[in-house]
Image (cartoon, helix red, strand yellow):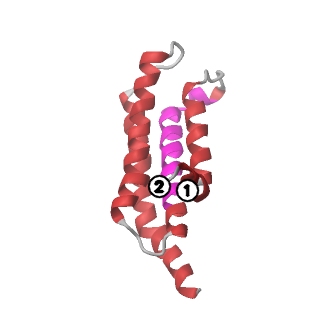
């Protein structure tokens, strides 16, 4: 596939990837939210769970038949690999951020939850939509 195909098929997901990359490398301001226990981990679960959910939904809207290999690669493996790369780059290339295995675990948790949601909720709902057409 050509890059233009992915730009047309997954625009919201690609914007989310760009936003996650930006948020992963900028220096966040200090706020009162830092006082909430595990707030950082909740944010990681939401970011990567949201990305994986968007990938599921955009895939399901564009394909009438589901190829499990494509979904596993695109909506599960790619976000996990991206997460791992970002954590390694944070540790190696930044002074204001650090790579953290617990952040990586939170990211993987978000992806796993989104895959469960995609398989058991989004896939049946979107399949019903296509059956009505």
The span picked out in magenta is 33-56
- Judge by depth and name the residue closer to the eye, 112 or 10: 10
Q: Residue at x 46, y 22 (%)?
A: 90
Q: Residue at x 38, y 39 (%)?
A: 81
| Residue that carries the numbered disc 2 in the rendered image | 1
71 on left or right of 127: left
Res 5 label:
1
Q: Residue at x 52, y 81 (%)?
A: 128
Residue 122 in picture, x, y percent from top left: 49, 68
Q: Residue at x 57, y 87 (%)?
A: 132
Asked if the stretch drawn in magenta spans residue 39, the answer is: yes
Placement of 35 over or under 12, stated as above or below: above
- Judge by depth and name the residue closer to the eye, 41 or 63: 63
68 on left or right of 124: left
Q: Secondary structure at mark 1?
A: helix
Asked if the stretch drawn in magenta spans residue 59, the answer is: no
């Amino acid at each position: 596939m050509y890059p233009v195909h992915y730009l047309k098929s997954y625009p919201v997901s690609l914007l989310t990837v760009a936003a996650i990359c930006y948020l992963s490398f900028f220096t966040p301001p200090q706020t009162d939210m830092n006082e909430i226990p595990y707030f950082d981990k909740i944010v990681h679960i939401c970011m990567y769970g949201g990305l994986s959910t968007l990938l599921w939904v955009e895939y399901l809207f564009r394909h009438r038949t589901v190829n499990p290999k494509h979904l596993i690669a695109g909506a599960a493996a790619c976000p996990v690999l991206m997460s791992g790369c970002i954590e390694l780059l944070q540790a190696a290339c930044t002074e204001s951020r650090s790579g953290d295995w617990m952040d990586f675990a939170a990211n993987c948790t978000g992806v796993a939850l989104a895959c469960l949601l995609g398989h058991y909720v989004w896939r049946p709902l979107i399949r019903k939509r296509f059956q009505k057409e």
